[in-house]
Amino acid sequence: MATEILMPALSPTMEEGTLAKWLVKEGDTVSSGDIMAEIETDKATMEFEAVDEGIVGKILVAEGTEGVKVNTPIAVLLEEGESADDVAAAPPAKDKAEAAPAEAKSADKAPTTAASAPEPDTSPDWPDGTKLKQQTVREALRDGMSEEMRRDPNVFLMGEEVAEYQGAYKISQGMLDEFGAKRVIDTPITEHGFAGIATGAAFGGLRPIVEFMTFNFAMQAIDHIINSAAKTLYMSGGQMGAPMVFRGPNGAAARVGAQHSQDYAAWYMQVPGLKVVMPYSASDYKGLMKTAIRDPNPVIFLENEILYGRSFDVPELDDYTVPFGKARIWREGTDVTIVSFGIGMSYALQAAEKLAEEGISAEVIDLRTLRPMDTDSIIKSVMKTNRCVTVEEGWPQGSVGNYISSVIMQQAFDYLDAPVINCTGKDVPMPYAANLEKLALVTTEEVIAAVKQVTYK
């Protein structure tokens, strides 16, 4: 029996396309999986495969035809022994077209199984008209901690050089003078020791902020972080928790070698019981720090040494906080979604700016928190752009981008017009030499190249 081959829908949003090229001719025998034609849309050119075997009896739409509607018959496939004359005897296409409205009406009543776009919280972080001031990330962090220490006497800061030296990176400048030595505490160089003391203090009802001079040194304290702080609330049946913040610079700085340059975002993001924050802008550093201190769970607050001196707009509000699990859209776009966090946002935004000059519109999402992660904002954006590139400085295997890719595959696979690409640091320990360190880090140029790959530019 003759079978009509219909114009395929190559994505959920496709309504019509161009039949660019036939790769078979009338009389050819095809098998399931054979490439029959190339179909063009406004987004991509894709190959169209045969889904059955047979003989190409008649080509109904010539190659080069534009505006071919989805589900329009474009060819007829014959079984062995049938001839092209059988095609002529088939009912005219007009009759089929006339029957289509009735079929469509019936289909309207059937329940739909297509995924609907999620509705994430897209409300602004501060009201319109709010007065803004320029602040460095360093200053915003200090203000966030100081405001919470004024609000709650159970909050205290401890770590190496946080008091007398006013912080290895001057984050706690002036805090010893204001709060005294009992609430801004210098510790010995023993991360395992003071992280354990802080975890015990949190079990007892206090709210410690633990500063690691670098999160690389938190490797000495990771047993307290993961086995004590993260798990006790669950293992005690809710009787005892650890409301505390572990904070400090994370990731690469500048020529500090392999042991001082690791990005721990993906490490901690995997641990149930922890919340993981990695901001980019000064306002997010302040607002998320205040939220972290108030949270009843242990929070990993990953900072970046290179960002400390950068200035951003910060709202002048009496009590400015940013909720966990709410991403921020820095730039709206229609062609591709770029997802990043922390210093990776620098590369994402620079790439988006340069891509715009070439006519590619990129939507840039700053996750801000990795656990909980606002995957709804990612999915909604991908449903619009049909493409995604992730950007981070961490290693490629088991990266944050890997997790994001898996979520997109499960929740928005039918909306993708290209594979998700993860831009990461290189799969090597960080070199000390400046020229090699530069090669090991992700770059703006790599992000641009990834975007052009998924947009077929």
Image: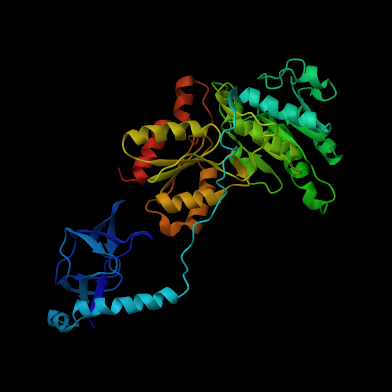
Taking the spot 65% from the left edge, 20% from the top edge, the residue there is 169
State left or right for residue 139 relative to residue 427.
right
Seen as rendered, the residue at the extreme left is: 85
Q: Is residue 442 visible?
A: no
Q: Nearer the viewer, residue 262 or 447?
A: 447
Residue at 49% across / 61% down in the picture? Answer: 116
Counting from the top left corner in percent of width and height, residue 343 is at 53, 31
Is residue 12 toward the left or the right of residue 147 in the image?
Answer: left
Q: In the image, 20: left or right of 256?
A: left
Tell me the quarter of the image containing the C terminus.
top left
The correct choice, above or below, for 53 with respect to 362 in the image is below
Q: Residue at x 79, y 28 (%)?
A: 150
Rendered location of residue 200, percent (x, y): 84, 37
Asked where in the image residue 39 lies, by quadrant, the reply is bottom left
Q: What x and y, as percent, mark residue 312? A: 55, 26
**In the figure, is residue 298 to the left or right of 428?**
right
Above or below 290: residue 172: above
**In the rendering, at what x and y percent does residue 113 appear?**
47, 68
Picture quarter with the N terminus: bottom left
Among the 4 quarters of the image, the one containing residue 278: top right
Residue 22 visible to an observer of this rendering: yes
Judged from this view, the residue extending furthest toward the right is 204
- Residue 326 sits in which quadrant? top right
Residue farthest top in this picture: 165
Comparing 174 with 85, the one in front is 174
Image: 398 above or below 303: below
